[in-house]
């Protein structure tokens, strides 16, 4: 058993909701108390600085992550949160864009949960949510389509609570 620590502060990840290996030897941990980077070689955590957005910590409660393969620099990490919606994080300068309600970039956070971030074989970005349906987005965070359940409409999706997606081979 190996124990890892964060020498920068007393803050270590509490209840890791998601782990993401970026393929470059870095393990990203989305936890209830923020976003952490694990340096496996040094066996220590580094905390991504917590950026407050109008008094709200939008880097807490990260529940899904996706490093954008279309970004040749490897600096774009999409993160779905439990409370702030979708974040597009620039790992180089530690900044982020907040995208909420799947409708547009906003100036204040709103509450919706992103359960998964998925890019299909056609390079389309899909955002699965609890309560806001299924979103199809471009790389700038603009919504191209929002598939939602509509009562009485037989052609709509069955629920606005989407947990997972699978792409079949017949695309």
Image (cartoon, helix red, strand yellow):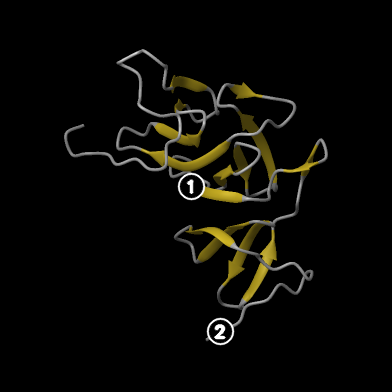
Q: Quadrant of residue 32?
A: bottom right
Neighbor class of circle 1 (other Cα within 10 Å; few <14, some 14-19, many 20+) is some
Q: Which residue position is annotated with label 1?
A: 66
Which mark, residue 82? none
Asked whether the viewer can see residue 74, the reply is no
Check the image and report above or below for 58 versus 97.
below
Which one is nearer the viewer's eye here, 106 or 148? 148
Q: Which residue position is annotated with label 2?
A: 2
Number of numbered callouts drawn = 2
The percent coordinates of residue 37 (x first, y second) are 61, 62
Check the image and report above or below for 90 versus 154.
below
Name the residue at 44% across, 40% down. 70
Name the residue at 68% across, 76% down. 5
Neighbor class of circle 2 (other Cα within 10 Å; few <14, some 14-19, many 20+) is few
Q: Quadrant of residue 102?
A: top right
Q: Are marks 1 and 2 in contact (CB under 8 Å)?
A: no
Q: Is residue 52 left or right of residue 102?
A: right
The percent coordinates of residue 144 (x first, y second) are 46, 20
**Label 1, label 2: how many angstroms apart (C-alpha)?**
26 Å
Q: Is residue 52 left or right of residue 95?
A: right
The percent coordinates of residue 73 (x first, y second) are 53, 46
Q: Secondary structure at mark 1?
A: strand
The percent coordinates of residue 128 (x first, y second) are 45, 36
Query: Which residue in the rendered view is the most extreme toward the top?
Result: 153
Query: Which residue in the rendered view is the most extreme toward the left?
Result: 170
Instruction: Indicate which disc, 1 or 2, sits on the residue closer to the N terminus.
Output: 2
Q: Is residue 12 left or right of residue 132?
A: right
Quadrant containing the C terminus is: top left
Query: Which residue in the rendered view is the most extreme toward the front?
Result: 152
Query: Which residue in the rendered view is the most extreme toward the right?
Result: 55
């Amino acid at each position: 058993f190996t124990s890892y620590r964060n020498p920068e502060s007393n803050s270590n990840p509490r209840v890791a909701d998601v782990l993401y290996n970026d393929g470059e030897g870095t393990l990203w941990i989305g936890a209830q108390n923020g976003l952490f980077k694990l340096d496996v070689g040094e066996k220590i955590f580094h905390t991504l600085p917590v950026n407050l957005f109008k008094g709200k910590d939008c880097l807490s409660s990260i529940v899904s992550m996706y490093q954008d393969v279309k970004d040749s620099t490897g600096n774009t990490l999409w993160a779905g949160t439990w409370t702030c919606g979708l974040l597009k994080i620039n790992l180089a300068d530690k900044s982020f864009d907040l995208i909420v309600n799947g409708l547009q970039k906003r100036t204040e956070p709103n509450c919706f949960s992103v359960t998964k971030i998925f890019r299909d074989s056609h390079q389309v970005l899909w955002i699965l949510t609890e309560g806001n349906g299924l979103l199809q987005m471009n790389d700038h965070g603009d919504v191209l389509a929002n598939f939602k359940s509509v009562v009485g409409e037989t052609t709509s999706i069955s629920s606005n609570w989407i947990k997972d997606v699978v792409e079949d081979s017949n695309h």
